[in-house]
Image: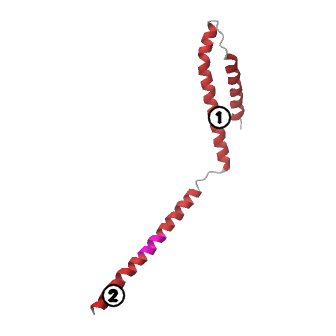
Amino acid sequence: MSARLAGLLFVLIVVPALSQQANIQERIEKKIDWHNEMAAGTIPPAELDANAARVKTMHQDAEELSALSVSLYPDLQQLRKGLLARDLAEKLKKMEKLSKKLRRDMEP
């Protein structure tokens, strides 16, 4: 009798534990599938990548133009005193090219 009772208790304990294990595995797989679906929806289309690259390039050009403008100020101060900086003409040409490029890039 005690062997039957022990066997019955064993079956009553093992069967739910095994079904819970299978249930947990299914829930994990569903969660992984859900995360993969959500991640697939966040991949930007190629058009947005091209636009982002264009904006990034424009931003870099604007920063370079700003830096050139700041570096020109001391050269222009020296020019007022009659001293011509060696690279003043190069800086001015580069500023002109950058400003034209930025204007062209801003057009739709």
Residue holding disc 2: 7
Q: In this view, does 93 lie above or below 47?
A: above
Q: Residue at x 47, y 70 (%)?
A: 25
Residue 50 at what x, y percent from top left? Answer: 67, 44
Q: Is residue 25 above or below residue 97?
A: below
Asked whether, in this view, residue 2 is left or right of residue 105, the answer is left
User: Residues in magenta?
Assistant: 20-26
Asked whether, in this view, residue 68 is left or right of residue 12, the answer is right
Residue 26 at what x, y percent from top left? Answer: 48, 71
Give the residue type that dot 1 points to: Met
Q: Which residue is drawn at 62% across and 28% down?
A: 64
Residue holding disc 1: 58
Q: Residue furthest left?
A: 2
Mark 1: few/some/many CA within 10 Å (<14, 14-19, 20+): some
Majority SS type along the magenta span: helix
Asked whether, in this view, residue 17 is left or right of residue 89, the answer is left
